[in-house]
Amino acid sequence: MPTHNSISRDADQRVRRSKETVLRTTFELLTETGLDGISIDEIARRSGVAKTTIYRHWQTRSDLVIDACSHITAEQEAPDTGSFEGDLTVLLTNLAELLRTARWSSVLPSIVDAVERDPSLAEIHSRIQRGHAAPLRTIIDRAVRMGEAPQNTDRSAMVAALVGPLFYRRWFSREPLDEVFVKAIVRNITGEREPSAALSAVAPIAAPQDQ
């Protein structure tokens, strides 16, 4: 005869499976239609999970979308090749590959567009941005400590100078995201030493604040 504990475990497993099904279905819809195609009705129809069950776990569509997008980042470890240039090259090469192949890269434009109209989705955008920036900031901080980048380097501006060209090619120019392009981006940052046009473009005029 089933015990109370076994019944409880079975119930917990059913809840976990239904949540995983809903989250997977939501992400699939995002990759197919963008945010405009997401509705609780359609998620319930596609997943086979009742609307009442969905609303029991997520009070709003925004809550569900934020949860489903929790892994839409370029989460990577910061490499340590022994040089600033090597670290940046490895990390940007990996990011370029993700932008070419990962399913989340096709969803990002609709996320950016939706945040402009729905502030409740801003957490998705912030989470994605933090995921891209974190390993780069680690590399930049290390380069500053090692004297490979100026002490007054503006971390945020440098991250933008490194990642921005990749995003531009992925969603605007549609030119190749290849090794040649990645190395050109890195050389723009590391190719010269002070006074450097590349580095001065990412260094603040005023004394830097803690990042």
Image (cartoon, grey):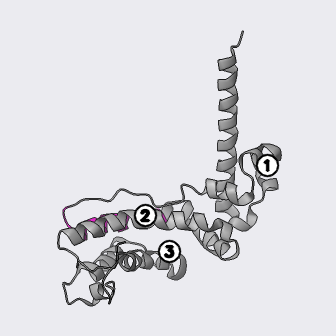
Residue 54 magenta-drawn? Answer: no
* Residue 184, visible in the rendered structure: yes
How far apart are labels 1 and 3 at the CA level? 32 Å
Q: CA distance from mark 2 to mark 1?
A: 33 Å
SS for dot 2: helix
Identify residue type, mark 3. Arg
Residue 8: quadrant of the picture: top right
Residue at the disc numbered 2: 97
Q: Tell me the element at label 1.
A: helix
Q: Which residues are magenta?
A: 82-99
Of circles 1 and 3, the one toward us is: 1
Q: Is residue 172 above or below residue 27?
A: below
Q: Nearer the viewer, residue 157 or 112?
A: 157
Which residue is depicted at the point 65% across and 66% down? 121
Query: In this figure, which residue is indicated by the disc labeled 1?
Result: 44
Whole-Å distance between the Cαs marked 2 and 3?
11 Å
Left or right of 135 on screen, residue 150: left
Amino acid carrying label 1: it is Ala
On the rendered structure, is 36 left or right of 121? right
Which tag, 1 or 3, sits closer to the chain's start?
Answer: 1
Q: Main secondary structure of the magenta part?
A: helix
Q: Residues within 10 Å of mark 3 (few under 14, many from 20)?
A: some
Measuring 64% from the left and 72% from the top, which residue is drawn there?
Answer: 115
Residue sitting at x 44%, y 58%:
75
User: In the drawing, what numbered circle is on residue 13?
Assistant: none
The magenta stretch spans residue 87: yes
